[in-house]
Image: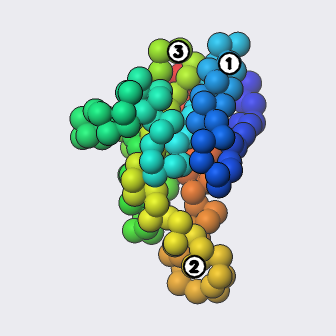
Amino acid sequence: MNYPCLSQFVFNHKGGVSKTTTAFNIGWGLASTGKKVMLVDLDSQCNLTGMVLGYTTVSESLDNFYSSRYNLTMESIVDTLMNGSSVEDLVNNDTAKLFQCQNNNLFLLPGHLSVSMLDSQISVALKIASGVPLTRNLPGNLPKVINLIAKKMASII
């Protein structure tokens, strides 16, 4: 049976208000009840990614993690969106996989520094709705690719 994906966001401009810890704990809790959960780190500081991977400092071993061609990260998603490539092609690529956490139902779409490039692009895209097709489609394509990944994850695992 195919159930719709439910998205929950933890957002606040202020730092140090427990966004990362809350997102991780909610994800772990839901995964512990048997739900398939995909944590998406949309912060260019990658704190959620570091927490899930167990790094005491975020930059500790992220370079090794990112250099693996098997890990699907926000870097490849940002590159796809910025180049105007098909998000379906990225999702259907069997080379890159989500990172599976210690809990078998919990997966991570790791953040990347390149996520910060989307901030200004999305701002421009929202201001010029009839502008350049690439930037016009940017705000809608990010949730689209994340939903496609979530649906693919649910059907494979």
Q: Using the numbered discs, state the Cα–Cα distance from disc 1 to disc 2 in whole angstroms.
A: 37 Å
Q: Amino acid at mark 3?
A: Asn
Q: Position of residue 65 (x, y in %)?
A: 30, 34
Residue at image mark 1: 29
Residue at image mark 3: 104
Which one is closest to the eye, mark 1 or mark 3? Answer: 1
Residue 90 visible to the viewer? no
The answer to which of marks 3 and 2 sits earlier in the sequence is: 3
- Estimate how packed mark 1 is, as few (under 14), some (14 to 19) or many (20 or more) residues with alpha carbons within 10 Å: some
* Quadrant the N terminus occupies: top right
- Estimate how packed mark 2 is, as few (under 14), some (14 to 19) or many (20 or more) residues with alpha carbons within 10 Å: some
Residue at image mark 2: 124
The answer to which of marks 1 and 3 sits earlier in the sequence is: 1
Residue 108 visible to the viewer? yes
Q: Amino acid at mark 1?
A: Gly
Circles 1, 2 touching at the beta carbon (< 8 Å): no
Which one is closest to the eye, mark 3 or mark 2? Answer: 2
Q: Which mark is residue 86?
A: none
Q: Amino acid at mark 2?
A: Val
Vertical order, 112 against 2 (above or below):
below
Residue drawn at 66 percent across, 31 percent down: 22
- Estimate how packed mark 3 is, as few (under 14), some (14 to 19) or many (20 or more) residues with alpha carbons within 10 Å: some
Mark 2 secondary-structure assignment: helix
Circles 1, 3 touching at the beta carbon (< 8 Å): no
The answer to which of marks 1 and 2 sits earlier in the sequence is: 1
> Dividing the picture into quarters, in which one does residue 129 lie?
bottom right
Q: Position of residue 95 (x, y in %)?
A: 33, 38
Q: Using the numbered discs, state the Cα–Cα distance from disc 3 to disc 2 in whole angstroms.
A: 39 Å
Mark 3 secondary-structure assignment: loop
